[in-house]
């Protein structure tokens, strides 16, 4: 592969040929890169080895010059297909300028020439370049409707549920989109008027973090329970079971934790206010208890973090067992992601607080990945923020109806006092479809611009995430509207758990088995449009809502319809 000299903005934040905005001056900057060739040109990405903390988590990003945005597999001189890559680059920067500031060039709508607004414009632009291959008549009459933002629809090969880095960089190269793959925080302070109303230039609080840093100091996000606190939990569990109190009726009042409870209450408040947005409770041992005791303890402990619980599907299930149920339960091409071993891209769920209790971790892979939404926001260009904040994304409901759901944004403006910064709320599956949930044919596809921006969010999350190597018995809590999350793929299970699992028998601890709760503090911790969205998603019983049936499965649900239906998972569908 050929290696080219590249120009770099003065702040070192872009790579590849700059669009005539600077007069280059050769500098002494040299770095190790991976070089990927596109149509005879190479795109160079700075790389270095990933730092390893040696503790219970690792960062997803890599420690390299900050203008590189590399996922796993591209940082150590190898590409995602493990082919050797030449590694050398000479970078250039500039003190002189043609009058356009580099940050202005990145934050303005540089896509105006890269993304024709319509098929007609696409025809006009290609005719201007003496390329008559694309015309309005080339669009089949049976094509899905155009995307709501008016830009051309993305190619089917690029619409991946788990985005492809190679496709992402290839599209950036072809469209000369240098802002797609930068890693420096975007400096919008000097031009706040370019942002949508109410959106801040930057987010600055404790929830804006880098997994590279947090992986080195787990003491800042792990609460280790003491033996006496475990005794408190066991005593409360016994009292609940002996009193025949239903799981739906457990509260902090009837699940007393004199020492641990106040700590959990404080940490629960920090999820909304001035904390990192997540924490891990460590020190429980699921192997010691029956399935019923494990779930009772989990629900009781969690009532101190969030005293309201949300329903997770249309059947009324209040907790779900996330476990690969194997091909004997349903074929892999039909099982939805929570019941398989596939990788899951970054997304949000429907609830305000998410809880995961680790009955047993995967023997290999399967780690949960958390990424700060604020950190991602600070690295988006103004144009990307406008795209995400536009009400032009159509979510697939995977129903038999041919109705087109009303489009909505993925990024919501801040609403004081509960949500002082913008909120990401989305799931990729209803936007791109997946192999087990193809997008409904009557719905408009994502546009090229929407897909580029959505993929940018994913790869920024991958760069800055914390990959939590959770231990058996850990409980992970996080604020769903401050953090987006994903999951590694992991080794497949060989057989599903027994259909007639005994709630009073020791809980099964084979294969990756997490139990999920959706929680919130009483009254909720979000406001404005996000609060309206949470109500629309129907997770919580709001004031005035009629009573609803609640199901509390103590053991995994082995039901074909449940594990193959496409109409839920995160709830955005």
Image (cartoon, helix red, strand yellow):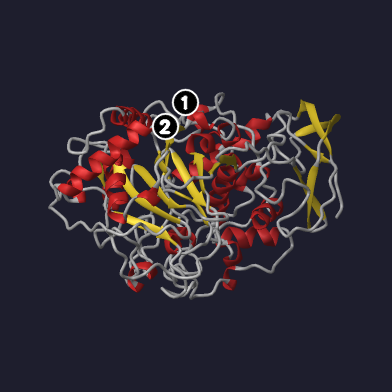
- Judged from the image, the secondary structure of the residue bearing numbered disc 1 is loop
Query: Pointer 2: what residue?
Result: 421
Query: In which quadrant is the C terminus drawn?
Result: bottom left
Of residues 244 and 562, the one nearer the viewer is 244
Residue 273 spot, x, y in % from top left: 37, 28
Residue 244 spot, x, y in % from top left: 15, 50
Label placed on residue 96: none
Of residues 538 and 118, the one nearer the viewer is 538
Mark 1 and mark 2 residues within 8 Å of each other at the beta carbon? yes
Query: Pointer 1: what residue?
Result: 205
Q: Earlier in the sequence, mark 1 or mark 2?
A: 1
Residue 514 spot, x, y in % from top left: 41, 53
Residue at image position (79%, 31%) is 93
Nearer to us: label 1 or label 2: 1
Residue at image position (36%, 51%) is 516
* Distance of label 1 from label 2 (alpha carbons): 9 Å
- Judged from the image, the secondary structure of the residue bearing numbered disc 2 is loop
Query: In which quadrant is the N terminus drawn?
Result: bottom right
Residue 26 spot, x, y in % from top left: 87, 31
């Amino acid at each position: 592969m050929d290696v080219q000299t590249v120009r770099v903005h003065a702040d070192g934040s872009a790579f590849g040929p700059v669009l005539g905005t600077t007069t280059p001056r050769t500098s002494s900057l040299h770095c190790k890169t991976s070089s990927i060739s596109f149509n005879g040109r190479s795109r160079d990405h700075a790389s270095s080895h990933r730092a390893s903390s040696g503790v219970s988590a690792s960062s997803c990003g890599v420690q390299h010059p900050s203008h590189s945005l590399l996922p796993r597999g591209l940082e150590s001189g190898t590409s995602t297909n493990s082919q050797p890559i030449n590694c050398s680059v000479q970078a250039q920067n500039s003190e002189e300028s043609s009058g356009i500031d580099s940050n202005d060039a990145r934050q303005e709508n540089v896509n105006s020439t890269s993304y024709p607004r319509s098929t007609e414009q696409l025809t006009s632009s290609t005719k201007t370049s003496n390329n008559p291959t694309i015309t309005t008549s080339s669009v089949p009459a049976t094509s899905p409707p155009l995307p709501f933002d008016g830009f051309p629809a993305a190619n089917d090969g690029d619409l991946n549920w788990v985005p492809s880095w190679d496709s992402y960089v290839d599209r950036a190269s072809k469209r000369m989109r240098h802002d797609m793959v930068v890693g420096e925080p975007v400096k919008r302070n000097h031009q706040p008027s370019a942002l949508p109303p109410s959106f801040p230039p930057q987010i600055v609080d404790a929830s804006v973090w880098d997994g590279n840093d947090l992986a080195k100091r787990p003491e800042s996000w792990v609460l280790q329970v003491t033996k006496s606190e475990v005794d408190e939990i066991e005593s409360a569990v016994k009292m609940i079971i002996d009193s025949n109190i239903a799981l739906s009726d457990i509260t902090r009042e009837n699940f007393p934790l004199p020492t641990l409870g106040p700590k959990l209450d404080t940490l629960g408040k920090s999820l909304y206010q001035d904390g990192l947005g997540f924490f891990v409770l460590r020190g429980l041992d699921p192997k010691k208890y029956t399935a019923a005791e494990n779930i009772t303890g989990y629900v009781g402990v969690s009532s101190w973090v969030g005293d309201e619980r949300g329903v997770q599907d249309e059947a009324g299930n209040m907790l779900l067992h996330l476990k690969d149920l194997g091909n004997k339960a349903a074929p892999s091409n039909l099982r939805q992601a929570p019941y398989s071993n596939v990788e899951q891209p970054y997304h949000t769920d429907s609830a305000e607080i998410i809880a995961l209790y680790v009955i047993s971790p995967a023997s290999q892979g399967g780690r949960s990945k958390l990424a700060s939404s604020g950190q991602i926001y600070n690295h988006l260009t103004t144009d990307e923020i406008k795209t995400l904040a536009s009400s032009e994304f159509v979510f697939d409901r995977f129903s038999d109806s041919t109705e087109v759901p009303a489009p909505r944004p993925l990024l919501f403006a801040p609403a004081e006092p509960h949500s002082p910064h913008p909120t990401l709320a989305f799931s990729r599956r209803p936007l791109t479809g997946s192999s087990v949930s193809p997008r409904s044919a009557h719905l408009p596809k994502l546009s090229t611009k929407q897909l580029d921006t959505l993929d940018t969010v994913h790869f920024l999350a991958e760069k800055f995430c914390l990959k939590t190597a959770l231990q058996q018995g850990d409980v992970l809590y996080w604020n769903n509207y401050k953090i987006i999350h994903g999951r590694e793929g992991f080794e497949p299970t060989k057989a599903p758990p027994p259909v007639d699992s005994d709630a009073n028998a020791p809980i099964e601890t084979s294969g990756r088995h997490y139990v999920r709760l959706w929680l919130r503090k009483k009254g909720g911790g979000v406001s404005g449009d996000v609060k309206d969205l949470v109500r629309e998603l129907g997770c919580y019983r709001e004031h005035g809502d009629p009573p609803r049936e609640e199901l509390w499965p103590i053991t995994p649900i082995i039901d074909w319809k449940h594990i193959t239906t496409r109409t839920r998972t995160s709830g955005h569908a």
